[in-house]
Amino acid sequence: MVNKLKNYYSKLLMMKNINLLLIGLMLLAFACKKVETTEDVVVKKPAIDSVELKRQDSIRMAREAEEKLKAMLEKERLADKGVDLEDKYQIVIASYTVKDFGKDTKQEMIDAGFKAKIFMLEEDGWYKLAIESYDNSTDAYNALERIKEKGGVFAEARIVIK
């Protein structure tokens, strides 16, 4: 029985030692946790040169966007707006002595996306096939250059002033 008691106490003592060891390890683990301080954190400030480069890039990108917008607006302004016979400048691609002779070409122009019209100016005997018209000469001459670049029937385009 004494041996049993010794055995029991030795196991109890061993368990106590294991428990103490575990508690010690846990205390050690939590006690050694590193506390972050603001001294450990390094804040990098951007170099003035990089800020200036980013600013310049932003300015460049804004200017490019503005130029693209202007180009789009100019293209839209010069886009085929059709023919208004009240406009002073008519862009004409062909003339005919008989109106019916121009109907096929007019239909081809309509199929190509133009809003073509045939008209006669002051009973001069010539029916003119107009594909665009403008109120001012600048727009008309810019459109004429754009149209002539297409070549073919457009190469001989001209402006008729009413």
Image (cartoon, helix red, strand yellow):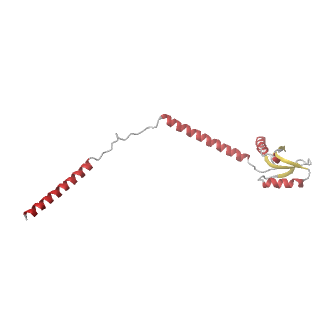
Residue that lies at the very extreme toward the bottom in this rendered image = 1
**Labels in figure, total:** 0
The image position of residue 161, as x and y in percent, is 84, 43
- Which residue is located at x 79 percent, y 54 percent? 110
* Relative vertical location of residue 136 with respect to residue 117 in this rendering, above or below: above
Left or right of residue 151, residue 10 in this image: left
Left or right of residue 64, residue 157 in this image: right
Name the image quarter holding the N terminus.
bottom left
Name the image quarter holding the C terminus.
top right
- Which residue is located at x 17 percent, y 55 percent? 17
The image position of residue 16, as x and y in percent, is 17, 56
Residue that lies at the very extreme toward the top in this rendered image = 49
The image position of residue 124, as x and y in percent, is 91, 47
- Which residue is located at x 19 percent, y 55 percent? 18
Residue that lies at the very extreme toward the left in this rendered image = 2
- Which residue is located at x 79 percent, y 55 percent? 111
The image position of residue 47, as x and y in percent, is 47, 35
* Relative vertical location of residue 22 with respect to residue 148 in this rendering, above or below: below
Residue that lies at the very extreme toward the front in this rendered image = 3
Left or right of residue 5, residue 121 in this image: right
The answer to which of 27 and 110 lies nearer the viewer is 27
Rendered image quadrant of residue 135: top right
The answer to which of 72 and 111 lies nearer the viewer is 111
